[in-house]
Amino acid sequence: MKRLALLAAIAMALSTVVIVLGGTPALAHGAMLKPGSRTYFCWKDGLTQNGNIVPVNPACAAAAGVSGTNPLYNWFSVLRSDGDGRTRGFVPDGQLCSGGNQTFDGWNLPRDDWPLTHLTAGADFAWAYNAWAAHPGWFYLYVTKDSWSPTRPLTWNDLEDQPFLSVDHPPLTGQVGSVDAQYNWRGRFPSGKSGKHIIYSVWKRSDSKETFYGCSDVVFDGGNGEVTGIGEGGPPGGSPGACTGTYRVTNAWPGGFQAEVTVRNTGSTTLSDWTVSWPTAAGQTVTSVWNGVRVGSGSPVTVRNTDGNRSVAVNGQTTFGLTANTTGGSDPGGALTCSSP
């Protein structure tokens, strides 16, 4: 009898453990990479050679002064486990950039000197959202009204009422547990915008109530994803890298061709990531890419770095190749654009 009682007690304990473990959802982690969120860019801004995080950008330094440097190491954790996709009426005014998560209060500071991504209103864009810990879900992108000012706390009334872009379970690429893990999609910015704005992102998981919130500071000035404000004003970073993409046909045959794209670092610091995009000409279909990772399909063609060629020294270059079928010519359908966060 004692043995039966002991076995019953063990079985009950094990069932309790299973229930507890089964009822605790695994946490996702992630943040907007393109256009970069405040937490992501401030993490990049603060990186040093010995692995410490020492922000150089004045706004990033001020945020760390409020919240400490731990949020910089956890730049992918601006979340609410009870969010369930809620926005207005759930996240308080003035706390949108932290999602109401007090750990990230410093990122709510109303300032005019956060790192900026330069964009073109109405343009198509290759979006990237980090998935350090990946989970399925939806992404909703809002933009500030023309009346918004960067020198006052962001409120829900400062945002346009509806998302200008919604994305349903986009594809995941890269190695989970790193910056390379990304949800990628194509989408246009709203037309008629100019000057500085905030793009506000909401990532709602479909397998739990966990929801992520983030602010990406942008300026609609005709740019193509260039970033300023990272590492400017002192060591260790220097100004962020800039790059160009050059396309040349290396071989051709009836119905197809091979081409090579050269990525050059034209900036003042080493590139840590790059993405090249161009429109395909009528009748062309890219069939393979090597030394690069293709994002999506169709036109435009978007290729980002591999782990092996992500780093490009100042004045240095790297290449990737491709093959394509064609019923016409072998030239691209328009100019190549290259960007680096």
Image: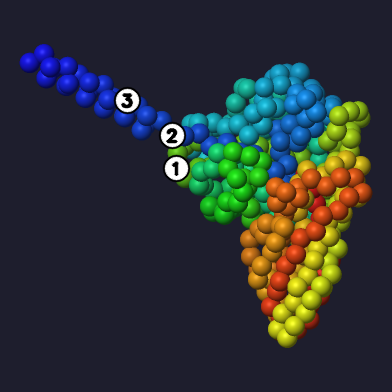
Residue at the image position 76 percent from the left and 54 percent from the top: 275
Q: CA distance from mark 3 to mark 1?
A: 21 Å
Q: Nearer the viewer, residue 25 or 2?
A: 2
Q: In the visual, does 172 lie left or right of 256?
A: left
Residue at the image position 60 percent from the left and 31 percent from the top: 77
Q: In the visual, does 175 lie left or right of 311?
A: left
Q: Are marks 1 and 2 in contact (CB under 8 Å)?
A: yes
Mark 2 residue type = Pro
* Comes first in the chain, label 1 or label 2: 2
* Comes first in the chain, label 2 or label 3: 3
Position of residue 2 measured from the top left corner of the image (x, y, whole percent): 11, 13
Which residue carries the number 2 mark?
25
Q: CA distance from mark 2 to mark 3?
A: 14 Å
The residue carrying pointer 3 sits among few (fewer than 14), some (14 to 19) or many (20 or more) residues within 10 Å by Cα, namely few
> Vertically, is 275 above or below 313?
below
Which residue carries the number 1 mark?
207
Position of residue 153 measured from the top left corner of the image (x, y, whole percent): 73, 29
Judged by depth in the image, the label closer to the viewer, 3 or 1, is 3
> Vertically, is 151 above or below 203?
above
> Vertically, is 148 above or below 128?
above
The residue carrying pointer 1 sits among few (fewer than 14), some (14 to 19) or many (20 or more) residues within 10 Å by Cα, namely few
Which mark identifies residue 17? 3
Any part of residue 151 in sight: no
Mark 3 residue type = Val
Residue at the image position 71 percent from the left and 57 percent from the top: 292
Describe the element under mark 2 as helix, strand or loop. loop
Q: CA distance from mark 1 to mark 2?
A: 8 Å
Q: In the picture, residue 19 is in which quadrant? A: top left
> Vertically, is 140 above or below 232?
below
Residue at the image position 91 percent from the left and 30 percent from the top: 233
* The C terminus lies in quadrant: top right
Any part of residue 302 in sight: yes
